[in-house]
Image (tube, rainbow, N blue to C red):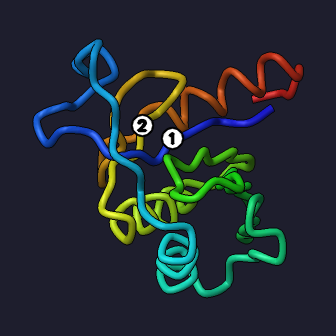
Amino acid sequence: MSWDVLLLHLPDDVSSMEEIPADYTPPPLGRRNDVLAAVTQAIPEVDLSDPAWGELLGPAWSIELNIGSGDPVESIMLHIRGSSEDVLTPVLRLAEALRCKALDCAEGGLLAPGRASGWPAFQQFRDRAAGTPQ
């Protein structure tokens, strides 16, 4: 089970999924080589040995980067697992490097420093679903 965050271009005035116009088609993040270079520059420890599915391992979390094989890269889905708040740092660093926004697929809001309520909510849901004592 993962907490999913979508990296994509959105209009500047959008702050949640509900505000995205129905007819909006986001522009791509960029050419494949440029996107992979930006990801590597933002987070040098990322494993892109499979450039369609990157992986980033932290001390108490992991992130799979579903980049896909298309060119240009339309968006990147992050599949986040773990139990540490510092997982938000690389997520926001990636969004900044790609000049895009990070959309919390569970709560529908955008992630920003100090604004990531979906991560703790996901952890609580995951722990209840797995029967993990709190």
Depth check, front residue: 34 or 131? 34
Residue carrying label 2 = 103
Residue at horizontal 57%, vertical 82%?
40
| Kind of residue indicated by mark 1 | Leu
| Kind of residue indicated by mark 2 | Leu
Residue 105: x and y, percent?
A: 52, 27
Q: Which quadrant would the N terminus be assigned to in this image?
A: top right
On screen, residue 50 above or below 130: below
Q: Quadrant of residue 21?
A: top left
Residue at horizontal 75%, vertical 60%?
52
Residue 5: x and y, percent?
A: 54, 40
Q: Which mark is residue 109?
A: none
On screen, residue 126 above or below 69: above
Q: Is residue 72 left or right of residue 108?
A: right
On screen, residue 111 above or below 16: below
Residue 81: x and y, percent?
A: 74, 46
Residue at horizontal 76%, vertical 65%?
55
Name the element at disc 2: strand
Mark 2 or 1, nearer chain start: 1
Q: Which mark is residue 6?
A: 1
Q: Quadrant of residue 103?
A: top left
Q: Residues within 10 Å of mark 1 (few under 14, many from 20)?
A: many
Residue at horizontal 30%, vertical 49%?
112
Depth check, front residue: 83 or 95? 95
Depth check, front residue: 59 or 65? 65
Q: Residues within 10 Å of mark 2 (few under 14, many from 20)?
A: many
Q: Which quadrant would the C terminus be assigned to in this image?
A: top right
Answer whether labels 2 and 1 touch (C-beta < 8 Å): yes
